[in-house]
Amino acid sequence: MAEVRRYLQSPNSSFFLFGPRGTGKTFWLNRYFPDALTINLLRPNVLRQFSAYPERLSELVSGNSDKNQFIIDEIQKLPELLNEIHFLIDKYPEKQFILTGSSARKLKRAGVDLLGGRALNISMHPFMASELGDQFDFSKAIQFGTIPLIWFSKNPRFSLSAYQTLYLREEVQMEALVRNVGQFNRFMESISFSHASLLNYSNISRECEVPRKTVEGFVDILIDLLLGYLLPPFRNVQKRKLISHNKFYFFDCGVYRAFRPKGPGDNRQNTEGPALEGLVLQHLRAWNSYRENQNQLFFWRTQSGTEVDFIVYGDDGITAIEVKNSSVIHPADLVGLKAFSEDNPEAKLLFLYRGEEILLKEKIHCIPCEKFIRELSPGSPLSGLSM
């Protein structure tokens, strides 16, 4: 197994590093900061020590004057430690404090802004195809996602199941984020059918027999745990009646498939279509994040149902992207892109599909989806892709 070099670059100042479990934060930190003093708050004895006496951190920093980097792993376990870190950043501006986390929930409640902008906020994502290079397998990615922990597992199906249990047990039950775990389990099954779809709280509430307000709270938990992502609608031009609901996605298409119940009524299109769309989005999110969020990501949909899956809008211009899990391009597949182009004539139009040919249909660039994600890298804007 060849080493995978990640696109994430280390800032020179102190920073927060967020990312779901298994995305490679620890491996990346060990590579960039091999001599750092690390405090792992996942270890119960370490958590107890710093909970009882947060000032211990100052003593460690003072006692290790030869160290220039200090890693506090899983900072969300002890948000109260941020006060001490705030003091240390001001006292030792030449030192670098690196705070990792797989959940933003407790930090939001405690107030990450306690650091007053003294620490940058960066994110680690699942593998991008271009990071993996020759190790990337398109079919495997659609089936199991690209979380490093899963990608290099000898049994990715089993590892995904274990990953699913990890979040329900450790992040939800142990942190007492929900009172009724049974309700949350039913909610997780129900919302898996909303992946790559408009988020309708009322429908989910009826399906899992959980009150709507509780469902809204559960969605917030998924977002805070970095398991889920809400894609907002694009409303730059008011020429048409547009919807205002967000779309929901799991952060990784393999995680989506792990949570989605399977039965004899399922067919390949029911699961693989949303998985493919999610795979494209997780690549776009990583690409944009590693480009320092120069763009914003949206979708576009009119009240009549005409839709474009993704709109990339920002410093790199405006690009509309439609994704179809089909090897054949039908005229109806291009309706959404054409409608969007009428309102936004300056937009670049991309149609990603499972075929093998690169085509130009009127103004629409039709590109094999595998080719698109293999070539996507933070070093280039979308316009830099070969077409």
Image (cartoon, rainbow, N blue to C red):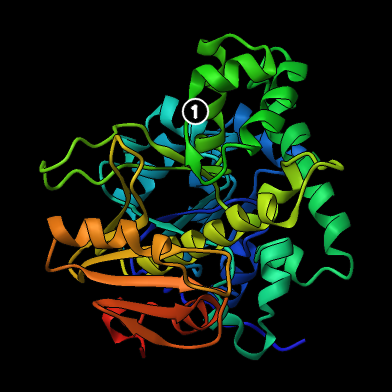
70, above or below 382, in the image: above
Tell me: 296 left or right of 34: left
Please tell me which residue lies in front, 248 or 156.
248
Residue located at (24% from left, 64% from top): 294
Residue located at (50% from left, 21% from top): 201
Residue 95 visible in rendering? no
Q: Residues within 10 Å of mark 1 (few under 14, many from 20)?
A: some
Residue placed under numbered mark 1 in the picture? 220
Type of the residue with mark 1? Asp
Is the C terminus in the top left, top right, bottom left or bottom right quadrant? bottom left
- Residue 62 placement (x, y as % from top left): 48, 54
Residue located at (56% from left, 62% from top): 279
315, above or below 63, in the image: below
Tell me: 126 left or right of 197: right
- Residue 116 placement (x, y as % from top left): 26, 41
Q: Which residue lies furthest to the front in this view?
A: 331
Is the N terminus in the top left, top right, bottom left or bottom right quadrant? bottom right
Q: In the figure, residue 241 lies in which quadrant? A: top left
- Residue 340 placement (x, y as % from top left): 23, 57
Tell me: 321 left or right of 17: left
32, above or below 208, in the image: below
Residue located at (67% from left, 55% from top): 269
Q: In the figure, residue 123 lies in which quadrant? A: bottom left
Callout 1: SS: helix
